[in-house]
Image (spheres, helix red, strand yellow):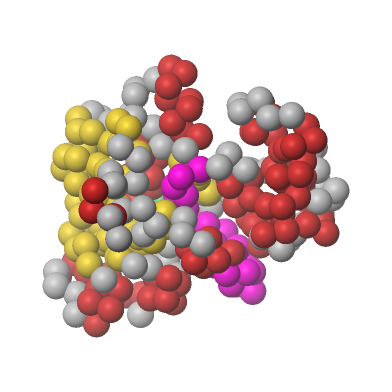
Amino acid sequence: MTAEVAAPMIKAAAVNKYFGDLHVLREITLEVPRGQVVVVLGPSGSGKSTLCRAINRLEPINSGEIAVDGVPLPAEGKALAALRADVGMVFQSFNLFAHKTIVENVMLAPVRVRKVGQAEARKTAMELLERVGIANQADKYPAQLSGGQQQRVAIARALAMRPKVMLFDEPTSALDPEMVQEVLDVMTGLAKDGMTMLVVTHEMGFARRAADRVIFMADGEIVEDTTPEEFFTAPKSERAKDFLGKIL
Ligand code: ADP
Ligand code: MG
């Protein structure tokens, strides 16, 4: 393996972010190698969502540097749009277009942003819907699908842009419990296929099984950065022990 010579897929160096006086990301430094699955844990308000949004430049940062696949993220403009396409994002709320069918939802960004032709976009969309197990619902509308199915469509929609990295921000938090696993299964499949993933989740089973690495955040800082085994069996910081004590 020559992994050492390749640039990390995600690199954040001394990133700081403020909302007014609130210092929400404090000197965040992080490198995620290609193909790694990182689960980000931490109490509410610790900066997990802001970190995801910063990596995708949905949120400007005050200082520091973020690069994806070796390319520093520009602040704005065309170059930003191109780089943002490299980073797929899946949120708690799926936000599918209600008046478009499932397959149209998946085709939309490639057609509009990447100028892919309709026929090719449809073919790719169907392949992706197959991959997330929803191909037989392609011509339905979002409201006709369950929450778990809609979130799987949202994953397919993100994949349609051929991202190098996938960010997941609490993708199962809005789902009824019986639908959580089908979404986690799709994510596990992606991980097995080698996708580089940063996943904010409260699903500890997923963190234990699928993560190569756990990052624990508190008050805008990375407090622990370790393996799942180590984090769950021997957390070092008081804040991590306290967090685990509340959720396990
Ligand atoms: P987490 O995802 O870990 O719950 P967030 O990244 O959402 O944390 O939020 C980190 C902190 O930043 C919180 O104190 C939150 O209230 C604050 N915050 C998040 N977004 C905004 C915003 N747009 N304006 C002001 N404060 C914000
Ligand atoms: Mg959040």
Image location of residue 11, percent across then percent down: 27, 43
Left or right, 165 with reference to 95: left
- Residue 96 sits above or below residue 39 on the image: above
Looking at the image, residue 99 sits to the left or right of residue 90; the answer is right
Specify the quadrant that holds the C terminus.
Answer: bottom left
Tell me the residue at 35%/39% (across/down): 68
Position of 228 with respect to 241 (left or right) is: right
Foreground pick, 188 / 204: 188
Which residue is depicted at the point 14% across and 72% down? 236
The quarter of the displayed image where residue 148 is located: bottom right
Asked where in the image residue 134 lies, by quadrant, the reply is bottom right
Placement of 134 over or under 143, stated as above or below: below
Residue 160 appears at what percent x and percent y? 62, 43
Q: Is residue 30 magenta?
A: no
Residue 60 in sight in this render: yes
Q: Position of residue 47 (x, y in %)?
A: 30, 48
Between residues 100 and 81, which one lies in front from this camera angle? 81
Residue lying at 72% horizontally and 52% vertically, measured from the top left: 127
Q: Position of residue 213 (x, y in %)?
A: 30, 65
Q: Residue at x 46, y 45 (%)?
A: 164
The residue at the far bottom in this view is 233
Name the image quarter holding the N terminus: bottom left
Left/right of residue 112 with respect to residue 211 in the rendered view: right
Residue range (magenta) = 163-185
Image height of 132 relative to 179, above or below:
above
- Farthest residue toward the top? 77
Q: In the picture shown, does residue 205 fall above or below 80?
A: below
Question: Which residue of the protein is positioned furthest toward the front in this rendering?
Answer: 1
Can residue 19 be seen in this snapshot? Answer: no
Nearer-the-camera pick, 161 or 206: 161
